[in-house]
Amino acid sequence: MSVNIEFDGKVYAVLIPASYKKEGVEFFTPDDYSQQLAYISHKENTDIKPHVHQVVERSVSLTHEVLIIRKGKLRVDFYSDNQEYISSLIIEEGDVILLTSGGHGFKVIEKVEMIEVKQGPYLGERDKIRFQGIEDSQVKYMGLV
């Protein structure tokens, strides 16, 4: 099962745990997200027809990030748009998370290898506002169903 991580009715992230399994194609994001996230599983010899993508102008005003954890454990700290700490979550090998709103920070719990996917072009420090995060003693973990 995928998990929407919500605070005060707003989705901050979509998590696909490494244990998620389902046959076929399932999108976890609404059509208005600038980054779409899907899980795809097909049986052997399934044909996926060749295709090209059409040129479609899109407008992106907020960067979404996808993290694919290849190895290790990473703590994700969630913050409101006002930079107030909300809660934390541990993600690990095989997990995929789409960060959709609010702020976030990370703490490497076990040596991590991950892939990040986001809209471009990446503008470096012009893309973000950095702020002081929490101390380890302030961490509170969310309970996921």
Image (cartoon, rainbow, N blue to C red):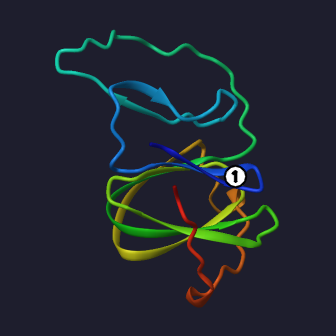
Seen at 33% across and 9% down, the residue is 49
Seen at 31% across and 14% down, the residue is 48
User: Is residue 59 rendered to the left or right of residue 94?
Assistant: right
Q: Secondary structure at mark 1?
A: loop
**Which image quadrant: the N terminus?**
top left
The one nearer the camera, 41 or 144, is 144
Residue 47: x percent and y percent? Answer: 26, 11
Seen at 64% across and 18% down, the residue is 56
For this orientation, the residue located farthest to the left is 44
Q: Amino acid at mark 1?
A: Ser
Examine the rendered structure and indicate whether residue 140 appears above or below residue 113. Answer: below
Mark 1 surroundings: few (<14), some (14-19) or many (≥20) residues within 10 A: some
Q: Quadrant of residue 22?
A: top left
Q: Where is mark 1, residue-wise? A: 101
User: Is residue 43 rendered to the left or right of residue 105?
Assistant: left
Examine the rendered structure and indicate whether residue 14 appears above or below residue 89. Answer: above
